[in-house]
Structure formats: structure tokens, C-alpha cells
């Protein structure tokens, strides 16, 4: 199969072949077949970012396993080598097409806002498709409370928004632009934000406890 693919795509000569038996046990291979047949997922031995970099809209579930083979270091001590694999399910197969409305992205962003202390409000959010890919670009106007570092707040919002959006939608977010449009000094508004922040933190704590159970 690999040889045929290499010839059809006119790829360079194969230098090394790694067989599945070298990195997986019989039980793991049987489990992979079962998951593929029942859940429509495929396990590929590549890091998550290598897949996600090229294919937006593929559901990913990365996980770490310990390679069964062991390597000896100079002191003849044995150590395990970690191997990252990704479970993927193409968005276009098994379950048909799916559509995510802009409102979903906006709701997630506003939930992220509620979890970051110092950000009082996201006034406008714009969702655009990247020109040369299926990636999404986000632009937002943000208001922060007086006394907080502007650049730190903007960077935190960018990082957390990208993380949550990609995790919850399986869509690549190629760019997040944040514009600070107002410094909030209204005490009533700040108290409302503080209540939303406390509620968001409590909900996160409950979720973490449920996961541990």
C-alpha cells in the first residue's frame, strides 16, 4: 500500500519503513479496528498539530501512549519513549455535513470573556473565513476595567479564545485580532462583571470535579 501511494504520487524513494507491529501491541491494533468500525475514527501515529495544520474541520482527539519498545541510555538504564497519536474522524464522513453558525463562535468568545478577570465586555465580534483556506479569522472590540494591563488582557483573550474555539468546534482559528476600545470605570458595570466572573469560576470548578469522578 505504501509503495503504491509513493509511486502514484511520485514521491521520493522510501528510506525507512516502520511497521505497525513495532509501535503497537496486538490488543491496541484490535482496539483500533473496533473503534474504526463502531465510531468511524482512525488512529494515525502523528502529532496532533501536524494534522490540524493542514486540515480544518476534522475532529481530533490527541492522546499519549507509552511505546512498548524500550531504549537503553549510556548507563544501560531503561526508559520509556512517549509516542503521540491522534484519533481522527473526517467531518465529511459517517455523520454527514455539519454547520456552525457565527453565533456559536460569538457565544464561546463571550463565555471566555466572563472567565477572565479584568475584561468587562466584548462589544463587537466579527467572524471571517481566511482567504486561502478553511480557517477562521476572529476580530473583536474589547472593554477592560481600569487598573489592568492592556496588553496582558488582550493577549490572554487571544490565547483563550483560540484555544476554546478550536477545542469546541474543531475549526482552525488562524488569527485573533483584539482591539481595546474602552477603559471601564463604571462601578455598577464592574460589579456585574465580577458576579459573572465568580459564576464562571464556580461552573469551571464543578466541571473539573465531575471529570475527576
Image (tube, rainbow, N blue to C red):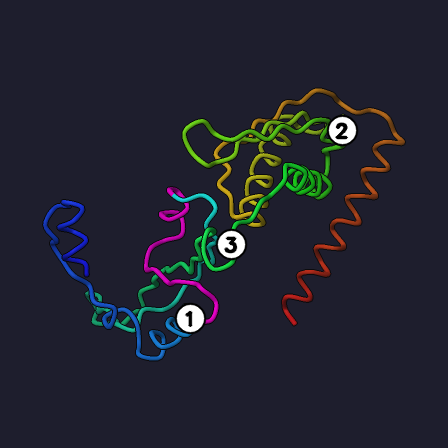
Disc 2 residue crowd, few under 14, some 14–19, many 20+, Cα 10 Å:
many
Instruction: Magenta stretch: give its range.
Output: 38-54
Alpha-carbon distance for marks 3 and 1? 16 Å
Camera-side mark, 1 or 2: 1
Q: Of the residues under marks 2 and 3, which one precedes in the sequence? A: 3
Disc 3 residue crowd, few under 14, some 14–19, many 20+, Cα 10 Å:
few
Seen from this angle, which residue lies furthest top?
Answer: 181
Where residue 96 is drawn, which disc sits there?
3
Q: 204 and 132: which one is in front?
A: 132
> Which of the 4 image quadrants contains residue 195?
top right
Element carrying mark 2 = strand
Quarter occupied by the C terminus: bottom right
Identify the residue shown where x is 37% and y is 42%: 54
To which residue does mark 1 refer?
A: 37
Identify the residue shown where x is 63% and y is 40%: 101
Q: Of the residues under marks 1 and 2, which one precedes in the sequence? A: 1
Queried whether the magenta region covers residue 120, the answer comes back as no
- Compared across the picture, whether 138 is left or right of 51 comes to right
- Compared across the picture, whether 115 is left or right of 139 comes to right
Question: Is 126 above or below relative to 33?
Answer: above
Seen from this angle, which residue lies furthest bottom?
Answer: 27
Alpha-carbon distance for marks 1 and 2? 52 Å
Element carrying mark 3 = loop
Amino acid at each position: 500500500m505504501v509503495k503504491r501511494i509513493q509511486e502514484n504520487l511520485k514521491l521520493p524513494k522510501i528510506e525507512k519503513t516502520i511497521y505497525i507491529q513495532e509501535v503497537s501491541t496486538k490488543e491496541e491494533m484490535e482496539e483500533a479496528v473496533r473503534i474504526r468500525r463502531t465510531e468511524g475514527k482512525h488512529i494515525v501515529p502523528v502529532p496532533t498539530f501536524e494534522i490540524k495544520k493542514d486540515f480544518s474541520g476534522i475532529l481530533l482527539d490527541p492522546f499519549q501512549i507509552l511505546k512498548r519498545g524500550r531504549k537503553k541510555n549510556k548507563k544501560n538504564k531503561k526508559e520509556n519513549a512517549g509516542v503521540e497519536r491522534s484519533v481522527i474522524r473526517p467531518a465529511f464522513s459517517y455523520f454527514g455535513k455539519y454547520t456552525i453558525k457565527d453565533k456559536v463562535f460569538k457565544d464561546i468568545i463571550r463565555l471566555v470573556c466572563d472567565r477572565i478577570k479584568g475584561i468587562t465586555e466584548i462589544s463587537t465580534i466579527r467572524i471571517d473565513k481566511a482567504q486561502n483556506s478553511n480557517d477562521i479569522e476572529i476580530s473583536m472590540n474589547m472593554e477592560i476595567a481600569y487598573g489592568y494591563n492592556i496588553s496582558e488582557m488582550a493577549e490572554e483573550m487571544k490565547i483563550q479564545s483560540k484555544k476554546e474555539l478550536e477545542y469546541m468546534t474543531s475549526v482552525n482559528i488562524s488569527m485573533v485580532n483584539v482591539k481595546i476600545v474602552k477603559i471601564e470605570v463604571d462601578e455598577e458595570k464592574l460589579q456585574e462583571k465580577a458576579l459573572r466572573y465568580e459564576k464562571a469560576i464556580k461552573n469551571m470548578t464543578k466541571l473539573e470535579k465531575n471529570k475527576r469522578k
